[in-house]
Amino acid sequence: MSRTVDVPVLVEEARAGTSRAVGRLISLVDDQHPALPEVMRLLAPHTGRAHVVGITGAPGVGKSTTTNALVRELRARGQRVAVLAVDPSSPFSGGALLGDRIRMTDSAGDPDVWIRSLASRGHLGGLSVSTPQAVRVLDAAGFDTVLVETVGVGQSEVEIAGAADTTFVLLAPGMGDGIQAAKAGILEIGDVFVVNKADREGADSTVRDLRHMIQLGEGTAPGGWRRRVVRASAMNGEGVDDIAAAVTDHLQHLVASGTLRRRRTARARDEITALAVARLRARMGDLGSGGLLERLAEQVVDGGRDPFAAVDELLETLDLSS
């Protein structure tokens, strides 16, 4: 196949800080372009430096406002910051609605801030299927912190915990979050809990409920980190420095305890598994209607073969090495 993308040049330009090249590489990732394996191969030696921070919470808690405020705080600390805002896919085009990027326009003019929306394309868990590779591009491009803001779908949004070094969960008073905090998922994924809109009535009780639920559960996360609860009002800029401090403290703890490498190894393992399953599904699709898979399915329906035997034959037929 003839080369349609000069990947080495794009990678070199992205590592030199050229925004256009970074955007082009992210587009290759999002489109799952045939050149993607080459992109990842060339980027691999330059990854592993960025702090990946996941931001999640139910719709309406102020994720985009908090992300924007955190970008400003991190820039004031001299960091280069990238934002991947995962938006719900349009039911018509499959593209992202781009609402988050619109709300972050005041940071978009900074050459050391890079913002991109990714469409979830129906992928469950609050992320896009291309998120891990997109993070790798931004990591190799020299960003100190990569903020990954999830779709905002509530309790099902636990995938971010496996995709980030540090995850902070936003809650807001008056939204039933005290009850939501009692559910299993939200306490398990959060390293830092942020009660946003803390100038509203009910903020004290939300903070109190969170701390109580953390104490009832495990007060410490794996590795010995004591989960924190931070009050903030991102719209007014209040408490954003406390969020940044908690995120930085968590990173330092991960490094000191050795948990950072374990988290990243688990993340790489999940990514490899997902890519392998996707490739296997594609290969199985080639054996679909009218092929081996159809014949095996008919044999299972007729009782001539059990599903496990059918799987054995299917896997023997597939050349999984290619």
Image: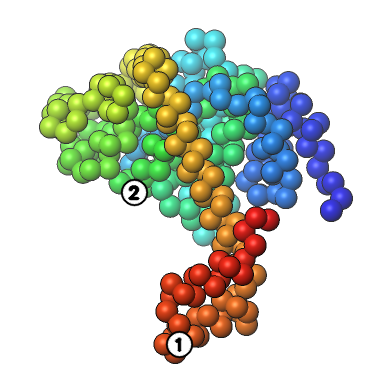
- Pick the quarter of the image with the C terminus: bottom right
Q: In this view, does 217 lie to the left or right of 273?
A: left
Q: Is residue 119 left or right of residue 168?
A: right
Task: Calculate the distance from the C-alpha at mark 2 to the C-alpha at mark 1.
Answer: 40 Å
Front-lying residue, 300 or 9: 300
According to the picture, the residue beneath numbered tag 1 turns out to be: 304
Q: What element carries label 1?
A: loop
Front-lying residue, 17 or 165: 165
Residue 117 sits above or below residue 283 on the image = above
Q: Is residue 100 visible?
A: no
Residue found 28% across the figure and 33% down from its top: 171
Circles 2 and 1: CB atoms closer than 8 Å = no
View extreme (right): residue: 2
* Amino acid under disc 1: Gly
View extreme (bottom): residue: 302
Classed neighbour count for the residue bearing mark 2: other residues with Cα under 10 Å, few (<14), some (14–19), many (≥20): few
Residue found 54% across the figure and 14% down from its top: 79
x, y percent for residue 298: 50, 85
Q: Can residue 255 be seen in this view?
A: yes
Q: In this view, does 298 lie to the left or right of 110?
A: left
Q: Which of marks 2 and 1 is nearer the N terminus?
A: 2
Residue found 27% across the figure and 28% down from its top: 221
Residue 272 sits above or below residue 257 on the image = below
x, y percent for residue 140: 64, 26
* Quarter where residue 266 is shown: top left
- Marking on residue 156: 2
Mark 2 or 1: in front is 1
Residue 69 sits above or below residue 132 on the image = above
Residue found 56% across the figure and 34% down from its top: 135
Q: How many labels does the image show?
A: 2
x, y percent for residue 51: 49, 23
* Amino acid under disc 2: Ser
